[in-house]
Amino acid sequence: MAKPTFNPLKLYIRGYDWTGRTSRRELLLFLGICVVPQLGLMYQRAALPDHRLLETFLWLLVALTVVPMWGHLLRRVNEIRWPGWVLLLMFVPYLALVVVLVLLVKGRGQRRLYELTAFRSLGFGLACILAFLCLTRAFWEPFAIVGGSMKPNLLVGDVVAVGKVSNSFDRGDIVALKRADGQAVMGRIIGIGGDTVQFKDGRVWLNDEQLSQEQIDPFQEVMEPQGALRHIPRCTNGAVGHGAVCEKDRYIETLPDGQAYEVLNIYDRMPSDDTGVFRVPADHYFIVGDNRDNAADSRYAAQVNGFGMVPHAAVIGQAHRILYSYNGPSAFSVWNWRPARILKAVK
């Protein structure tokens, strides 16, 4: 048997062959190679969040290591003579670490499975898809919705893909932004630079013209704690018990250009239902939540936990699609996922 090579280039190339064998030391070395760009991403996000070139380069490195990493894991499974389906356990939280540790310490077993079966070919294809998604991650970012300010269009538990390429935003766009305290939140642009915005009786007046609203069937949800923060929804139909139907008045609001979207109203005569006139400075946005009575947005100053006027530089990007959605405290509870919302367009 040939002595294992530790040439990094040869080790990398061998990872694309899913039918060979990998020793413990080779697997440990390649896992170390894979960890480097991931640690770099963690550092970049914490210390250099606006360094787009570095982020793009690091995601490229991550994408280039996805397929060979899985290849070396499978080659190690071959080495200890286990069936390839064992790697499915890598998708189970916490158990994945146990699997890796076993692969690093286990001796040889009783079977050899070197052939590229249909199951392994499918795995290779899925790994290539995952590598492509990693390659595109420099241009979009997932955001988890933890509060109810954007109901009914974004629900608690939605995970939304936000594009980071476009630098142009307009009225009606749902965007992610960084508040003055650094927290990332979402809202809908109502006013752009040069606009005037005012709320009267809960209705939006844009440039001295009232936006039309048409009432439709109420928005309904179950009265129960929502999301990881376990927030309790508020209802138009009063105080309802746990498990009962919580309703909110729902309207279709239309912008001057004809773009329409749904908004909610819970209470009348709220302090935020009547405001002064806001004049949006150049290169700023007036951004509000669609759940109007449950949103601290541009109607409130940053000093009182609102957005204030949002500068263009604080907008991260526009929300495009819901990647997946779950109803419960954890995304790992797949039985609580909402299949109908997977890849749904954000409007």
Image (tube, helix red, strand yellow):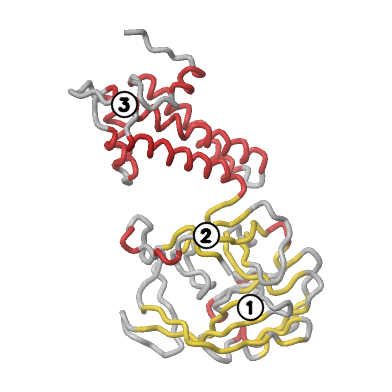
Would you say the residues marked 3 and 1 are in contact, meaning their CB atoms lie under 8 Å apart? no
The residue that mark 1 highlights is: 260
Q: Of residues 73 and 230, which is closer to you in this image?
A: 73
Residue 160: give its label: 2
Please state if 289 lies on the left or on the right of 83 as rendered.
right
**Rendered view: 227 above or below 279:** above
Residue 42 x %, y %: 53, 41
The three-letter amino acid code for the residue at tag 3 is: Glu
Measured in 3D between alpha carbons, the distance from the residue under mark 2 to the one under mark 3, in whole angstroms, is 39 Å
Please state if 268 lies on the left or on the right of 92 as rendered.
right
Q: Residue at x 39, y 65 (%)?
A: 338
The three-letter amino acid code for the residue at tag 1 is: Ala
The residue that mark 3 highlights is: 115
Q: Earlier in the sequence, mark 2 or mark 3?
A: 3
Residue 79 x %, y %: 29, 22
Residue 202 visible in the picture: yes
**Rendered view: 134 above or below 109:** below
Q: Residue at x 78, y 86 (%)?
A: 208
Q: Residue at x 32, y 38 (%)?
A: 119
Measured in 3D between alpha carbons, the distance from the residue under mark 1 to the one under mark 2, in whole angstroms, is 20 Å
